[in-house]
Every structure is written in C-alpha cells, then in structure tokens.
Image: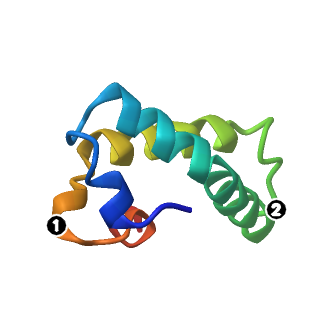
Amino acid sequence: MSTPNEYAAFPAGSDELIEKIVAENLGWATSIAKAVARAWNMDWQLDGLDGGAYEALLFCARRYDATRGVPFRGYAR
C-alpha cells in the first residue's frame, strides 16, 4: 500500500494514479462488500455488492488528492 507521498507523484485524477489506487485497494473494497453481505445475509456477488464496491473505489480514486496528506483509505471511508 502506497503512502500519500508516493501518490503525490501523480497528478490528482490522472489515469496512472487511479489505476495504482484501484490495483492496490481492490482487495480492501472486496472485503468491505463481503462484510456487508455477511451482516445483511446476502450473496456479495449475486446481489451486486462486488460491483458497488468497485464503483465506489473508482469514485474515490478519481476524486482523491494526495497533496492533502490524507491516506487513501482514510479518505475513502
């Protein structure tokens, strides 16, 4: 997982930054979707929680500005 300083090397909203954030945090988003599915007794893939988690990850990655010094996961929560 990269630090805000490592992400700051990329312009905010750039394709490179978005790809890096998504690649590093897709497992985290999936684990959140699975936790929600368990809490609500749902199937995380069948009920679309995996797609929702991916969309939320992309949304946050596009808006993230590493120059503010906030870790991505802290921002995305």
Question: In which quadrant is the C terminus drawn?
Answer: bottom left
Give the secondary structure at mark 1: helix
Q: Secondary structure at mark 2?
A: loop
Image position, residue 49 (x, y; %): 66, 44
Q: Position of 17 compared to 52: left or right?
A: left
Q: Mark 1–mark 2 contact, CB under 8 Å?
A: no
Circle 2: residue type: Asn
Colour pattern: rainbow
Specify which label sits upstream in the sequence, 1 or 2.
2
Report the mark closest to the observer, 1 or 2: 1
Horizontal and vertical percent for residue 30?
Answer: 69, 52
Residue in view at x 61 percent, y 34 percent: 51
Graded by Cα atoms within 10 Å as few (under 14), some (14 to 19) or many (20 or more), the crowding at tag 2 reads few
Question: As drawn, is 53 to the left or to the right of 10?
Answer: right
Q: Residue at x 67, y 55 (%)?
A: 33
User: Is 73 placed above or below 23 here?
Assistant: below
34 relative to 19, above or below: below
Residue 68 image label: 1
Residue 8 is tagged as none
* Residue placed most toward the observer, 40 or 20: 20
Quarter that holds the N terminus: bottom right
Residue 39 x, y percent position in the rendering: 74, 71
Nearest the eye: 4 or 25:
4
Q: CA distance from mark 1 to mark 2?
A: 38 Å
- Label 2, on which residue? 41
Q: How many marks?
A: 2
* Residue 43: image location, x then y, percent: 83, 47
Q: Residue at x 70, y 53 (%)?
A: 27
